[in-house]
Image (cartoon, rainbow, N blue to C red):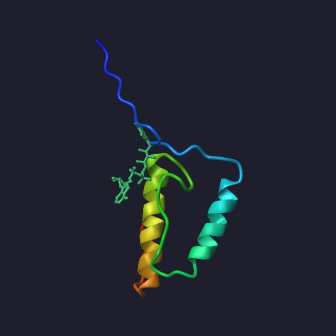
Amino acid sequence: MSDVARFPNATPQYYLGRLDAIRRLREELAATPTLALAGNALEGVGLPACVKSGNDAADKIAADLGFAVEKSGR
Ligand SMILES: Cc1cc2nc3c(=O)[nH]c(=O)nc-3n(C[C@H](O)[C@H](O)[C@H](O)COP(=O)(O)OP(=O)(O)OC[C@H]3O[C@@H](n4cnc5c(N)ncnc54)[C@H](O)[C@@H]3O)c2cc1C
């Protein structure tokens, strides 16, 4: 007996030039405080990269709101 579970479109398919596009998007978003990007479509699909992008996004929003952001050893 077998069981197949499919996750359609669950993993982004990176394309050439993606990093430049993300850099431009971040530059445009710099004009919009308290808005940040996170997730597997950005700098990596693995969980460590996703956690880092979430932490970085939270730090950006906290800093935009005027909170002192302490970087722990993460
Ligand atoms: C089957 C599978 C196995 C994997 N195994 C591994 C592994 O072993 N190790 C590893 O490092 N990585 C693994 N990955 C990759 C990793 O799990 C994902 O890249 C990562 O979880 C993506 O995190 P994310 O926060 O970007 O997206 P998600 O974890 O998909 O989070 C997005 C969230 O947004 C919510 N959401 C979506 N649309 C809306 C909306 N309109 N409004 C509100 N909420 C919304 C969703 O419900 C979801 O909770 C695996 C991925 C898959 C699919």
**Quarter-of-image position of residue 58:** bottom left
- Residue 5 coordinates in the image, percent (x, y): 35, 29
Is residue 51 depicted above or below 12 in this figure? below
Q: Residue furthest bottom?
A: 66
Q: Residue at x 40, y 36 (%)?
A: 7
**Residue most extreme to the left:** 1
Is 66 or 23 nearer to us in this picture?
23
Q: Which residue lies furthest to the front in this view?
A: 8
Q: Position of residue 67 (x, y in %)?
A: 40, 85
Query: Is residue 49 visible in the rendered structure shown here?
Result: yes
- Residue at figure coordinates x 66%, y 57% from the top left: 19
Q: Position of residue 15 (x, y in %)?
A: 66, 47
- The mark total stands at 0
Residue nearest the observer in this picture, 27 or 55:
27
In this picture, residue 71 sits left or right of residue 20 = left
> Can residue 69 be seen in the rendering of this structure?
no
Residue drawn 61% across the image and 46% down it = 14
What is the quadrant of residue 2 in the picture?
top left
Nearer to the camera, 69 or 65: 65
Residue 20, relative to residue 34: is it above or below?
Answer: above
57 or 6: which is nearer to us? 6
Q: Quadrant of the C terminus?
A: bottom left
From the image, which quarter does the N terminus lie in? top left
Give the x, y percent position of residue 27: 63, 74
